[in-house]
Structure formats: structure tokens, C-alpha cells
Image (cartoon, coloured by chain):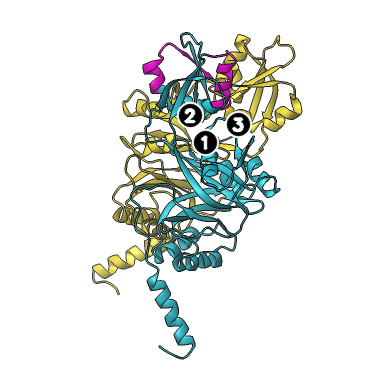
Chain colours: A cyan, B yellow
Amino acid sequence: MLPRIAYFGPQGTFTEQAARGFAADSEVDSELLPHDTVPAALDAVRRGEADGACVPVENSVEGAVPATMDALAEGEPLVAVAEAVLPVRFSVLVRPDGGPVRTVASHPHALAQVRHWLAANLPDAAVVATTSTSAAAVAVLRGDYDAAVSAPVAVRHYPLEVLASDVADVSDAKTRFLLVRPPGVVPGPTGRDRTSIVVTAPDRVGVLSDVLTELALRRINLTRIESRPTKGKLGEYRFYVDFDGHVAEPRVGDALAALRRHCPRTRFLGSYPKAVEGSPAPAADNAEFVAAAEWVARIREGRGA
Amino acid sequence: MLPRIAYFGPQGTFTEQAARGFAADSEVDSELLPHDTVPAALDAVRRGEADGACVPVENSVEGAVPATMDALAEGEPLVAVAEAVLPVRFSVLVRPDGGPVRTVASHPHALAQVRHWLAANLPDAAVVATTSTSAAAVAVLRGDYDAAVSAPVAVRHYPLEVLASDVADVSDAKTRFLLVRPPGVVPGPTGRDRTSIVVTAPDRVGVLSDVLTELALRRINLTRIESRPTKGKLGEYRFYVDFDGHVAEPRVGDALAALRRHCPRTRFLGSYPKAVEGSPAPAADNAEFVAAAEWVARIREGRGA
């Protein structure tokens, strides 16, 4: 139910492709609104000009996306309600009337990820950088270059032909995206959920160990951790932590409360279904948490010991 | 004493600037050898074609450099012996005979970091992407574009004029570089050292908590942590951890031994002097470690209890 989804544009990139996927899962026809930067897409949601935003969070080749991480840790809170994982496999696009390929254009990140493919398939073509994969498609359309290494979705926007598809040197490269919106009713647990938080911690020895011990003591499985210095505050760090489970589960709620006691500036970034199937670990059982809480309640009521 | 230093090129980039700094600190005249990729620069050291390599590890705007992290965790071990932190402040270079600036070229990362400066100072110039900041300087020299946003070191290689220097939207952006070489005598402790390790851990709940607790119990101050999935092994993670201290210190040696017991695939990435002055926390005192070890020794010898 997000009629207007902002995304980190331009049109024709992997982020648009992820945003289209989120829109397809929605019950309404969503309008997709490209923005120049990740913070601009998030601010559009904060100002009420969009109902949600699709932003990249990490890439298996390029690593985390600090712009997204910083922008989610600061400003009005936004909460993820869905994630998507897209394989990074490019299409090589040419003009329908195109002759031999003498020049190939794309964003330097994309060029770096198809280096071997180009050497094997277009060894004589000169390589040219553009500001985005979709700017390359526009430049090919305009006749500036002969081929563009683009996201597959680019052919929906530009009348180009696919010379090759599924192009990637590292076959399992992927990018993870989040769909975020202002805090509201959290989507219910599905049994294979992920929770994301960011913890701003003072520069005290052992503070991260305290945080992770609270998770480990409750048998909560960590799936990602990343530290970033807080802008402009020497010696203060933020820790971005992803773990298995949903805030509605007793074990997770209990752990979040404990983290908040250690670090009052702990921010909830969402509980949402995991996009990757893989071989998910079975969801941890919450029965022991329920039984233990009932035991304490009985003691407090004088009905047990 | 590293006569040949490989670096992630081309010439004229921030990495060359860092490599020059390392070479200047050396007692010999070092030859600088540019390589196309980070893994290529590291492999040159592994094959004995260079004595050390200068590689970027993290950027405060763009985040960690996964290519470096992956390449240090795999293959023949390499160990850091020095680090450098460079402010990311660009020079805008033009041809001496150049007229008005109608086009500005650089790597998209650099363009993103001077966006506001360009809007304020060259609002009418068209922005063009190149594959590196130094490729932009070459293109300006060739007459393709009017101005290049480059590393300050680029003017050493190309006969261009500095139109503006110290250009950066985020004034405190920095990049951290390491100088690595094959394992050998570790540089002695200076009292303000950093130690880097990478821990490959099985997907077991609490393993990272165990690792960090071993550091916290010894009052060791963590300065960075980053997780990355191990390539091709589902559910196995690597954790890159930086902390204050030197392997020669009892507390650090003791902690490393403990980590190795938890995770046999713990790799030492070096103990080296910290590049950033800032207001460093005073080095932790090792007296308690020495005293405690002597106490155990006395017990074993029947001389105390």
C-alpha cells in the first residue's frame, strides 16, 4: 500500500529494478519517483512527498552503501518493511542499426564487474566511463558510443537491442535493497524474518561486546555487522547490526530492551521477511521465553517459586 | 626498506599519493609500480615482483574497500607494517592555455564528493565521468574536456594548472591506506599502535560475541569491525577487526591466542603505528598481565598461592 515509491535513480538502474519488484508486490499501482541521491529519496518520504523509498544497502562486490547507512541513522526515523536481493548481471545494449562495437560505456563499478567478459568478447572495444549504467544507455541511444553495460531493466526505457544478457565476471554478485517508510504498524512475523538496528555507542571498551553478548545469550543469530564512525564526533561509533528474528518475538523484544538499556541511542530499522531463501536456519523457538516470563509472573503474584 | 612498492594505480591518484608518502618514510629510494587492480598489486608482492604494496582499505564517504579486504583474507598471507590516512581534498586542473570551463571530468565517486562545489563555482559546466581521477587529467591534457577533478599528486605527472585546490563538499572525508608485505619481523611497538585481524567463523550463534568478549575482558579497545560473507560458502562469515595495541604486548598476544582457540582460521593482518593523531586513548597498561603471569608461574613452581 505504497502508492508513491521514491528511489535512488536515474531510471533504468538496478535500484529502479528493485523498486519495480517492490511495487509489483504491492496491492496498488505504485508510482516510481527517481531521485538524484539516496538521502534525497529518503527525505522525500520524510517530507511526505513519497510513501516509501527503495534504497541499496549492500553489494557483495562493492560492500556497504554508507550513504544509505548514514541517512537511515540520522534524521526522522524510517523503518524497513521489505528487502530484495538482485543478482548483479548486466545486459549489453546496442542500437538496432548499430555496426561493429568499437566503444563500450558504463559506470566504472559496472565496467570493473565485466572486465573479463569484455576482454573475451569485445577485446578491441575502448572502454568509456559514464555517471551511471543508465547514462551509458542514453549515450548509446544518442550515438556517442556503440554499446552500454546496463541493468536489464534499461531496455524498458530505451529502444536498444540486447547484444548479450546475464553478463558478470563474478556469477554470484548481488545487491540488497530495502523498502523503507515512516514508522507504523510492523508487518507481522513470517517465521523467517530479519531485524535491523543501528546502535550509537560511546567509545567505551567492551560496549560492542555487551551488545553482542545480549544477542548471543538469547541465541539470536547475527547476519551482518558494520561499524562506522559518527560524523563529526571523534571516538563515537555506530554499529549496524542485522540478525534473525522479528521484534514481535519475545526473544527479540527482550534483547532490544536490553540493548536500549546499554545504549539509549539504539534505533530500530525494521523487522521484515528475508528475501534470500538459501537454507535458512530454523526460526529459534520462543517457548522458553514465554515459560520463563510466566514463571516470574507467578512468583510476583505469590503463586510459585 | 621496501625498494619496490606496488600500488593500485594508475599514476596520479590518491593511492599513488599514499604510496609516495610510504616511500618517503623509507630509507631507500623506492620504485613505485602501478597495477590495474588491488588484487594485482597484492599478487605482485606474493610473486616477489614487489617488496610491498600500498592499498586503500576504507574511505569515510565510500566505506570499506571489499577488494582489499577479500584479497588480504585469501591467498598467501600479507601483513601491514604501516598505515596512512589522506584527506580526500581534490585539485581542479585545467590546461595552461585553457579558455572557459565548459566540461568537468572525473571518476563518479569524486564527482559525487564535489557536487556542491561545482554547483557553486562552475554551475554551467557539463559533468563527464572517467574511469579514474587521473584518467580525467589525461583527457583534459588531450583537450577532450576543460577541467579535471583530481588528486593533488596528479600535477606531478601532467603539465596542467591548478584552478582550485582543497576542494571537497565534506571537509573531513578521508581514505585509509595500508602498506603490506610478506610476514617478517614485526615493527616494534610505539605505544600508539593498531592491530588488524580477520576471523573466519562458522555460522554458530554467539561466535562473534565470544571473539569480542575475549577482547573486552582484556580491556582492548575496538576501533573497527566489519563482516563479509565468505565467497562461495553459504552461512560462513569473515569478521575484520581493528583494535588498539601491538602483538608484542602481553594483553594483545594473550587475546590473539584466545581468539585462535575459538576460531582456528584467525589471520593476523599486522601491528603498525596508527596514522591518526587525534586524541589517542592512552595505551593500556600491561603490568597487570605481567604480574598475573608471574603469579601463575610461581604457583606452578610451588613458590606461591
Disc assigned to residue B216: none
Q: Which residue is mark 1?
A: A17
Q: Which residue is mark 2?
A: A152
Q: Nearer the viewer, residue B268 or B146?
A: B146
Distance Cα–Cα, label 2 vs label 3: 14 Å
At mark 1, the secondary structure is: helix
Name the mark nearer the viewer: 2 or 3.
Answer: 2
Distance Cα–Cα, label 3 vs label 1: 11 Å
Q: Residue furthest left?
A: B301
> Which chain letter matches label 2?
A
Tell me the kind of residue under disc 2. Pro
Sequence-wise, the earlier of marks 2 and 3 is 3
Q: Nearer the viewer, residue B134 or B296?
A: B134
Sequence-wise, the earlier of marks 3 and 1 is 3
Q: Which residue is mark 3?
A: A10
Question: Measured from the top left, where is residue B4 in percent x and y?
Answer: 41, 23
Q: Residue at x 31, y 56 (%)?
A: B262
Disc 2 to disc 1: CB gap under 8 Å: yes
Question: Measured from the top left, where is residue B76 in percent x and y?
Answer: 30, 35
Tell me the kind of residue under disc 3. Pro
Q: Is residue A198 above or below residue B277?
A: below
Report crowding for label 2: few under 14, some 14 to 19, many 20 or more residues within 10 A (C-alpha).
many
Sequence-wise, the earlier of marks 2 and 1 is 1
At mark 2, the secondary structure is: helix
